[in-house]
Image (cartoon, rainbow, N blue to C red):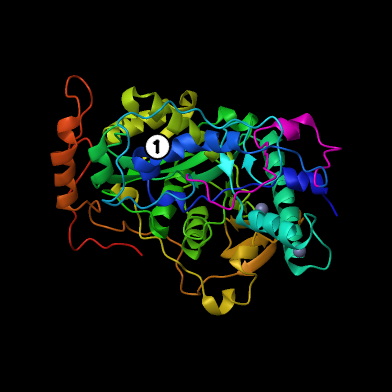
């Protein structure tokens, strides 16, 4: 076995991300009260101990232990999902929050870490892995607390742990490497949806439909890459949604932002809607074969599901902090949010505002008869597209030396940059705009502060002919 049990356990992480990305009520509404104040309380309530049977730390440096990806787990998993992970849909029966948010202290790593809940020491962020949670319960119920040999479930978990550890090593190695100037290494993720206007102390904000705002982050990875600024691609539902074509458009915008780079490496999670789909793969192939960018290759590296702590998380934490530091935690409009992102994280960021002209009709060009004979997408750990080739090059493990070349495209697929998806911004329903103007705008200060308007939000009414993208 290439990696020790102890390191595997250190890498064990608990996080359920993409359910979180459905609603920013967890940030700005009633659930924010719970979500933002519960994690520390949850931590204090737990008994933190080290499961020595799992923990073999010999051979690992302090750096690995206490670096940005330091992870801890809890010995007594609480099967109840943390409030942060499962915001309830906000409906009229929800009790309104107190008008003022308590000061928020990010959860800090416990003094005596244990092995079921993991906390990043750098950000205090939790991560939850369902596979590891189930395994924790399984070994307690069926094996007196120790993983067993010849048990299919324990074997599956062991493979998961081994791959999580291997993946983390490769991520850390990419973070530590002194990359040449023509290579850009980033982690990519969509921040939890922000609802604008964000008015955490205002009860009416909880009950008012607001504007979903999206932030796809291309965060630099590692200290040496820190001289490269993070690229934040920002838009909202009045401009476009967040389906595959639209997320792919955010990728294209980030690639065009550093069009002179020759080699691009993006660390991403396995979210099929965002990062592991044929629309994105086909479109990256188009881009790497276009004159739009100079890249010779674009590589996606995938984290093990559930173990996805990355520099983009840390960046998002900085954006959250910047919002909380605003008076009352208020973010009025889109301009205001752009300024929040630009001023966050010591301003090591370039903000790209995604506009209608950037939202393109990216196509899925894969040919199912070919791809069904290939490894499943879930198995892919590395995927590369190269200038001059219509193939994708993949690895099923981060440790593999050589890529496998796969022919995945329809013959008729034409790798050319498509036209825009819509003639104009997607727009929002008139009623939604009216509600905000009626319920929330009167509560905003008007003296010198930015105030919400159709102009400051770049809002147009939704054209009924405008296609939604599913
Ligand atoms: Zn896990
Ligand atoms: Zn078992």
Q: Which of 405 and 140 is in front in this view?
A: 140
Which span is picked out in magenta? 54-83
Q: Position of residue 142 (x, y in %)?
A: 75, 63
Asked if residue 119 is among those painted magenta in the image, a careful observer would answer no
Q: Residue at x 63, y 39 (%)?
A: 46
Q: Where is residue 173 in the image (x, y as percent from the top left)?
A: 72, 40
User: Would residue 288 be found to the left or right of residue 8 on screen?
Assistant: left
Q: Which residue is drawn at 14% across and 45% down?
A: 434
User: Would residue 98 be found to the left or right of residue 351 on screen?
Assistant: left
Q: What element carries label 1?
A: helix
Name of the residue lying farthest toward the bottom: 369
Name of the residue lying farthest toward the top: 448
- Is residue 260 something that shows in the picture? no
Quarter of the view holding residue 161: bottom right
Q: Which of 228 and 22 is in front in this view?
A: 22
Q: Name the residue under label 1.
A: 33
Q: Nearer the viewer, residue 246 or 439?
A: 439
Asked if residue 77 is among those painted magenta in the image, a careful observer would answer yes
Whether disc 1's CB lies below 8 Å from ligand 1 is answered no
- For label 1, count other residues whose C-alpha is less than 10 Å away and answer few (under 14), some (14-19) or many (20+): many
Looking at the image, in which quadrant does ligand 2 appear?
Answer: bottom right
**Most frequent secondary structure within the magenta stretch:** loop
Task: Note whether 258 is above or below 445 in the view shown.
Answer: below
User: Would residue 6 be found to the left or right of residue 98 on screen?
Assistant: right
Task: Note whether 70 is above or below 18 in the view shown.
Answer: above
Q: Where is residue 143 in the image (x, y as percent from the top left)?
A: 78, 60
């Amino acid at each position: 076995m290439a990696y020790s049990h102890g390191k595997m356990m250190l890498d064990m992480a608990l996080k359920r991300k993409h359910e979180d990305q459905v609603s920013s009520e967890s940030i700005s509404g009633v659930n924010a009260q719970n979500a933002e104040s519960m994690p520390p309380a949850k931590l204090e309530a737990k008994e933190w101990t080290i499961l020595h049977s799992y923990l073999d730390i010999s051979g690992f440096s302090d750096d690995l232990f206490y670096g940005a990806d330091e992870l801890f787990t809890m010995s007594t998993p609480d099967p109840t999902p943390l409030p942060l992970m499962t915001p309830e849909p906000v409906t009229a029966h929800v009790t309104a929050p107190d008008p003022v948010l308590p000061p928020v202290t990010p959860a800090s790593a416990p003094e005596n870490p244990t092995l079921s809940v993991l906390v990043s020491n750098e950000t205090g962020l939790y991560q939850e892995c369902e596979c590891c949670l189930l395994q924790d319960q399984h070994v307690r119920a069926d094996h007196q607390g120790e993983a067993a040999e010849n048990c299919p479930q324990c074997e599956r978990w062991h493979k998961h742990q081994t791959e999580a550890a291997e993946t983390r090593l490769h991520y850390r190695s990419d973070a530590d490497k002194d990359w040449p100037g023509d290579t850009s290494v980033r982690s990519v993720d969509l921040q939890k949806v922000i609802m604008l206007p964000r008015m955490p102390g205002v009860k009416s904000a909880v009950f008012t439909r607001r504007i979903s705002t999206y932030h796809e982050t291309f965060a630099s990875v590692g200290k040496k890459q820190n001289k490269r600024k993070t690229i934040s691609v920002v838009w909202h539902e009045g401009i476009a949604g967040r389906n595959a074509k639209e997320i792919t458009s955010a990728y294209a915008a980030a690639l065009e932002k550093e069009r002179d780079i020759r080699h691009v490496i993006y660390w991403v999670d396995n979210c099929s809607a965002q990062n592991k789909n044929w629309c994105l793969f086909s479109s990256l192939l188009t881009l790497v074969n276009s004159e739009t960018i100079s890249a010779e290759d674009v590589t996606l590296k995938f984290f093990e599901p559930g173990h996805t702590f990355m520099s983009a998380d840390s960046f998002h934490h900085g954006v959250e902090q910047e919002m909380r530091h605003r008076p009352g935690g208020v973010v009025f409009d889109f301009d205001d949010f752009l300024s929040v992102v630009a001023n966050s994280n010591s301003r090591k960021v370039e903000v790209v505002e995604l506009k209608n002209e950037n939202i393109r009709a990216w196509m899925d060009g894969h040919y199912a008869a070919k791809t069904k004979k290939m490894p499943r997408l879930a198995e892919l750990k590395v995927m590369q597209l190269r200038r001059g080739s219509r193939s994708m090059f993949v690895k099923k493990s981060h440790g593999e030396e050589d890529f496998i070349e796969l022919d995945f495209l329809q013959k008729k697929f034409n790798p050319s940059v498509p036209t825009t998806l819509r003639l104009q911004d997607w727009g929002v329903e008139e009623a939604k705009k009216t509600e905000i103007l009626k319920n929330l705008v009167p509560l905003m200060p008007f003296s010198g502060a930015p105030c919400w308007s159709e102009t400051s939000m770049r809002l147009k009414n939704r054209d009924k002919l405008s296609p939604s993208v599913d």
